[in-house]
Amino acid sequence: MAGTATNAARVATVLVGLALITLGISIQAGGTEPPIPELARWESQMLSFGQVHCASVTQLLSLEQLFWAIEYDAGRVYYQIADYTGDPFWSTCGQLAEAVYRDQYVLPINGGAAGHVNYTTGLRMDYRHTGQVASQQAAVLLSQNAAYAKDGTPLEWTRSADFSREVAFAVLSYINAEALGEPPRQRRVDLVTQAYDHMDQWFVRFAWPGPWEQNPVETNRLAPFMVGLTAHTLIRDWEQTGDPRLIPALRRAADWLWSNAWIPSAEAMWYEFPDQEQLCCQASGAAPDLNLLIAPIYAFLYRQTGEMQYRDRGDQIFAGGVRNAWLGGAKQFDQNYWWSFDYVRWRLGP
């Protein structure tokens, strides 16, 4: 890693570049869209906190500590920053993160990762940026051997939306594996259908405990950020298939969450309902750290429907997250920049 002075100079250079990039985006949008609130802060925090967390990958020693530094696919986050800024410094950070995840975790276990840490997008991006064949191999192994991704795994095991994250990451691993040359699999189709059923458990059947319960319980809670993870995967699938189930499912989710989970005074959604730490049934507190896992749903709906309510609600969620999220932890930083780049892209259009 470069010394402190070098890194500071590098950040200053990138900040200037970001100003130009932001200007370029505004021009590209034709001046028809109002500015995204707190975009400049989102950009500056991306650089300042990102630099700190990138450096931590070289400073921490145990595998457990290193894994905390790359949780929620740090390689993906750093490569997105590299693409956004054009600064190769962030590609180096991506390579550092993948060297930990790929070489110290995925390859030694032949891709047999736990389902909630099945991170293939960073590996796919590493292969695109560097040509590193080991990253291609690791992504494919995860799509074949990670928990709940393996062909033949009973679908009943992930029927409940309690496993929505595992299903979302498994489907994403199939999409990434196909992009890396692997053939399509029937299991992708099956798990996409299951992910839509998770959305129905939350927003159609209301099959979770609490005052909104309308059917026998199928899942223990509703967590808005988990909805965001499922929505992300379903959008990625829709980008290739045009699945007509997507827009209605996202509308139901976005409308219900805004009406029932949004806490205006906190500028955030509640973390979950019911709060798993208390007797049933009440909501947990606000979780602004997770706003940016939810906001892209609204920007996507705005871009697809043209309805201003989704733009305006998305802007409030985005701005609240940028202002109030704690970014001192690598996991929280990665969650905030996991797909908020899509928010910016969809929000500004075209």
Image (cartoon, helix red, strand yellow):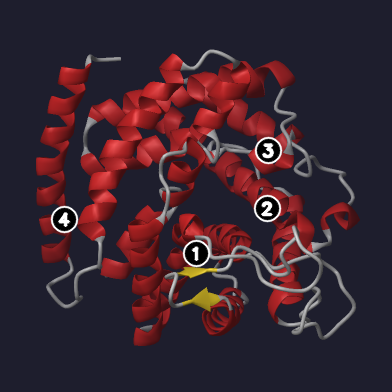
Residue in the foreground of this view, choosing between 17 and 138:
17
Give how far apart the Cα atoms at labels 3 and 1 are.
25 Å
Of tags 1 and 4, which is closer to the observer?
1
Residue matched to label 3: 143
Q: Earlier in the sequence, mark 2 or mark 3?
A: 3
Say which residue appears at 78% left-offset and 39% top-offset.
147
Asked if residue 7 lies left or right of residue 307, the reply is left
Residue matched to label 4: 22
Give how far apart the Cα atoms at labels 2 and 4 are.
32 Å
Give how far apart the Cα atoms at labels 1 and 4 are.
22 Å
Q: Earlier in the sequence, mark 2 or mark 4?
A: 4
Mark 3 belongs to which amino acid? Ser
In this rendering, is residue 222 above or below 119?
Answer: below
Q: Earlier in the sequence, mark 3 or mark 4?
A: 4
Q: Are marks 1 and 2 in contact (CB under 8 Å)?
A: no
Q: In what element is the residue under mark 2?
A: helix
